[in-house]
Structures are given as C-alpha cells and as structure tokens.
Image: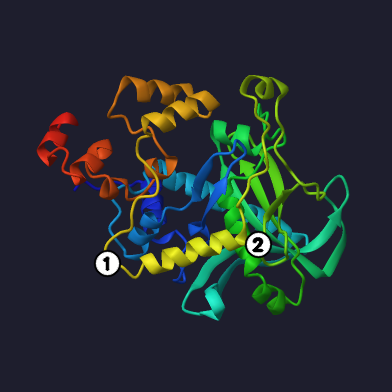
Amino acid sequence: MDTTFDPMQAYIYSKRNRGLRVSLGGLNPTGASCRITDERGNEQLVGKCHRQVWYSKKRVPRTNEADDLSMIRFGIGDAVEEELQQHWENQGVLLASNLKLKEPIGNDGNEDVFLSGEIDAVLRYFECDDTGKITMIDTNKAIGIEVKSTRGYFSEKHLMGKGNKMYPIGFPKLEHLMQAAMYLHCRKAVEKAYDVEIPYFVIVYEIVDSCKANQFRIELSNGYDGEILVKTMDGRLITPETDPMIQLKENIVYQAIKGLTLENMLERYMECWEKLKEDTPPDREFVLRYSDEVFEMMVEQGTLSKTKMKAWESNDKAAVGDWQCSYCDWKDECYPFGVLTERVESGEISMEDAMRELGF
C-alpha cells in the first residue's frame, strides 16, 4: 500500500473509527419509530426500521458505510454544535453539554428495557433583547437543546419553509421530533440532577450551505407523555396549511398528523426489544423500490420529485423507494440482489437470473 502525508485522510480515518458517539447500550432515541396518519391522510411508518436496529445491535458488519464526504459533513455538524455550546457557556447559560442519559422505558417499570442517548445541551432558561444580549436568567428552569446541521433543497423547503405551502414557516423532520420527545419523556432524571424544571426542548437547525437557521419548540401534551406538539419559539402551535388551489384541485384539506404520540413510540420500542431476542432479522419495514400502486399515489399527490419519477419509469431495476433503504448502512446486506431480492427469496427467479438481469 502506498503511503503519503495526507492530513484530511488521517482526519477522516480517525473520525470514522473513533470520532462517533458511543452508545451506552439499550435502545436509542435515534432509533425511535411510530405509525402515523400524515397530513394527506396516508397511513405510514416513520422513523427507524427494526431490521436496521437488529443489524446494528447484533453488530452485523456494515455493507454501505458512510463515505469520506459524509464523514466530513459529520465533522462540520460537530463543529457547529461545539461552537454553539462554547458561546452559550460564555454567556453563563450552559447547564450541561453532551449529557449522557440512560433511563428505563419498559412496561410496568421493567428496567431491562432502557433508553440511552446524549442530549446536545441543557440551557438555563433566559430572556434576551433584540441583539441577543441576555437580560434575565432563571436558575429554576432549563430547556433541552438538540442541534441539527443540514443542507440542500430538502432543508430549505421543509425545515425553513421556502416554497413550502403546507408549512410556510417550516416543520422539523419527524425523526428529530421523536428523538426530542424521548428525551422529554426521560427528563425527570435530568431535572432531579440539576434541580430544575424542563418544560420543553428546542430543535435548532443550521443550514450550513446557506448559513440560515430555524428553531422549533417541542412539547408533550401530558407533560412526560402524550401527543408530540410542535410550536414556534413564542409558543404558537404549528399546524399544516392548505393552499386554496390544492384544495380545489385535490378536494383535500390537510390535517394535523395523527398518531405521533409517546405511547405509540413506546409500543414500537417494546416490539423492537422483542425482535432483538431473535437470531434472525425481522421483516423489512421499508422498500428499496416503490410498487406500482404506491408510485401512482405519490405521483398523484405530488410527493415524488421529477428526477425520481423519471428514474422509476425509465428503469425497472432502479432503486426508487424509501429513503430509509437508500441511506441504510446495511442496504446490500438487506437487499443483496437489489430490487430483485424479494423475487429471489420467494423462488420466483434464481440468484443466477437475478445477477444476469442486474448486469453482472
């Protein structure tokens, strides 16, 4: 192997092998999932696939690890978080940073099932003037913070609200909502340790390529459980808006998401815990390629990009499906024959025929 002086490659190697957060075991907030009815009335699963969690917890080798560019992006996200933490500390409001949490979430107090995660920051509640200068600090109250760095068209539209007729002021990613909700559910230990009340969490988004930011206040309707509520920073509930032209064309009025509750999330966690006891992976919960029926529905509702629509129509082997599959670290483990995998598993076609159809 050739060797050379390469500072960036050395950084990427270190980041990949030692620079990512280490789990304390158990289940994780980033592994949350829930069955919901979305704004258009479609029933769907959001969050982490249990098969992916099984691969991770069973330490199955990753077949689709993050590339070098992704590792650099992770580093930029870490740098943004550290920068914010440093300035909050300078202002005297940082109560804790990268706070590790490990709390039971099992039914009837079953401590075998527990959640472990790391809260980005806990800030003392404060008020500031228009310039950001802090004018008041409440030592009895604190707010949990989750920092998310992101980029691209999705972020501008969905998180910032650019051209978003359903949520003109933006709306958090549902996976991030569920992560914050789990921290809210388990926050009693933090409140006790720091002798504060934590009424809500805030998700802070930084769009690194446009240098924009947005913030959302996250609460649970019943304090430590109930429905997940998304609010503006001044406490106004954010609900979907229906563009009059869409209402006229599709005869639909967007509704608030249903089923996004702490109870439904905990039910999914318990299901996942039982699946982890098995020696074989659970069923797939997302698809590498949409069925004809799902494709037609997404086209009709306008939820599929023109690029993906063209790829799906022009190539019946194209992996145009759920993003959870496209970006999974175990994609090739789960779908060893790509979109033909399930046909091979059912015996409809042989492995040799599948490889031939895929061009190998």
Residue 54: x and y in percent read: 35, 61
The residue positioned 72% from the left and 36% from the top of the image is 169
Classed neighbour count for the residue bearing mark 1: other residues with Cα under 10 Å, few (<14), some (14–19), many (≥20): few
Disc nearer the start of the sequence (1/2):
2
The amino acid marked with disc number 2 is Ala
Residue 157: x and y in percent read: 62, 32
Seen in the image, is 190 located left or right of residue 78? right
Seen in the image, is 289 located left or right of residue 214? left
Q: Of residues 69 and 316, which is closer to you in this image?
A: 316
Seen in the image, is 259 located left or right of residue 24? right
Q: State the image quarter where residue 352 is shown.
A: top left
Residue 304 visible? The answer is no
Tell us which disc is closer to us: 1 or 2: 1
Residue 264: x and y in percent read: 56, 59
Residue 66 visible? The answer is yes
Residue 293: x and y in percent read: 41, 30
Residue 200 marker: none
| Above or below for 318 versus 2 | above
The residue that disc 2 covers is 121
Secondary structure type for disc 1: loop
The residue that disc 1 covers is 279
Q: Measure the alpha-carbon separation of dots 1 and 2.
A: 37 Å
